[in-house]
Amino acid sequence: MRILIIANGKEPSSGLLGSLHSACDRFIAADGGGNVAIRMGYTPDVVIGDLDSFRHMDVYHGNLIREPDQETNDLEKALSFAKKKQADRVDVVGATGERLDHTLKNLSVMQQFDPCFNQLAFFDDRLFSRIIPRDFSLSLPPKHLVSLFPLSGKVEGIITDGLRYPLRDESLENGRRDGSSNETLKGDIRIRHRTGALLFITAITDQLL
């Protein structure tokens, strides 16, 4: 099952939301993300959260789930729901872009829930982001943006093929070295790493949607 979640961060374009919505099996709004969805003409199957931000109680006729627990944010609640529904792929829009503290929190949530799904990815209008498995391959256009970030603090044993600035059994570490603003050579890439959570960020292509 493929689930799309909309959170209450930067609003996606109608094109991005439409493409992801057309491919999903269920559409979940994390609290205030439901306001964005309804304003853009989409009705979520589920609105979940503490519901302190959702403003359409009077017109919404889907599944409304109130979870007041303040130890988890609304995206965590939505991802927990997706896990219970045995989703194998989860796409998230609106998880970044408005407040830096919320963006950092949601990246932490991504790391927390990534083992629960075959793919958990964040989308905005320019970028696709996900934690990649230990051995990861993808075909992208030549000279295509690729950035690597050590989400777990440090990632060791990174080997890359097909990138302009290769890594050869090297480490990335917060505050010391990152892998931002790399690019593909001919297009096909392979990235391996030994330890840690490695965040892969690239410019969106149709194949990633």
Image (cartoon, rainbow, N blue to C red):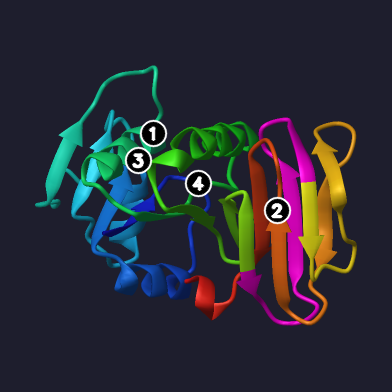
Q: CA distance from mark 1 to mark 3?
A: 5 Å
Residue 161: image location, x then y, percent: 79, 66
Three-letter amino acid code at the position of disc 1:
Glu
Mark 1 and 3 residues: CB-CB less than 8 Å, in contact? yes
The structure residue drawn at horizontal position 74% and vertical position 63%, both measured from the top left corner, is 146
Nearest to viewer (mark 2 / mark 1):
2
Residue 124: image location, x then y, percent: 55, 60
Most distant residue in the left direction: 61
Q: CA distance from mark 2 to mark 3?
A: 27 Å
Nearest to viewer (mark 4 / mark 3):
3
The numbered mark at residue 194 is none
Say what secondary structure mark 1 lies in: helix
Mark positioned earlier in the residue sequence (1 or 4)? 1
- Of 131 and 78, nearer the camera is 131
Say what secondary structure mark 3 lies in: helix
The structure residue drawn at horizontal position 54% and vertical position 36%, both measured from the top left corner, is 111
